[in-house]
Image: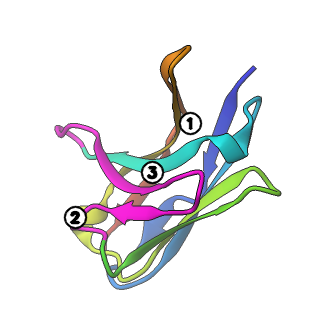
Amino acid sequence: QVQLVDSGGGLVQPGRSLRLSCAASGISFSMFAMAWYRQAPGKQRELVARITSGGNTNYADSAKGRFTIARDNAKNAVYLQMNNLKPEDTAVYYCNANRYTLAEGRRDYWGQGTQVTVSS
């Protein structure tokens, strides 16, 4: 049974930091790309940051220079360090695990989401 458990969200003031965590189980973690998405009220879910199984990263323009994604394959975990948070970062953040194989195509798994609210 695949399970992704997101944690670390909360209410913070603008300019402060938060670190999100995602603990994965039931998958061969090191073989999956991992990502963080977010969804604000009334908006579509959007990619924030992604890290491949090999450790390559890419970020949404809104996250570049402020957010850092990292993975720990020994702990089956992925993290999102968010610095200098802005009110527009307010959203539910979701952990995603994805992998493409010729045999099965693309597989996606999602965490339950963790709320991040940036407000003074």
Q: Indicate the amino acid at tag 1.
A: Gly
Q: Earlier in the sequence, mark 3 or mark 2?
A: 3
Image point (74%, 36%), residue name: 28
Q: CA distance from mark 3 to mark 2?
A: 16 Å
At numbered mark 1, what does the secondary structure look like: helix, strand or loop?
loop
Q: CA distance from mark 2 to mark 1?
A: 22 Å
At numbered mark 2, what does the secondary structure look like: helix, strand or loop?
helix
Q: Is residue 89 left or right of residue 113?
A: left
Q: Is residue 24 left or right of residue 110?
A: right
The x and y percentages for residue 26 are 77, 29
> In the rendered structure, are the residues bearing label 3 and label 2 in contact, judged by CB atoms less than 8 Å apart?
no
Image point (17%, 37%), residue name: 42
The residue pinned by badge 2 equals: 88
Q: Which residues are magenta?
A: 41-63
Mark 2, residues whose alpha carbon is within 10 Å: few (<14), some, or many (≥20)? few
Report how many numbered discs are placed on residues in the image. Answer: 3
Is residue 60 placed above or below 42 in the rendered structure?
Answer: below
Mark 3, residues whose alpha carbon is within 10 Å: few (<14), some, or many (≥20)? many
The residue pinned by badge 1 equals: 111
Disc marking residue 36: 3
Is residue 80 placed above or below 113 in the rendered structure?
Answer: below
The x and y percentages for residue 120 are 31, 77
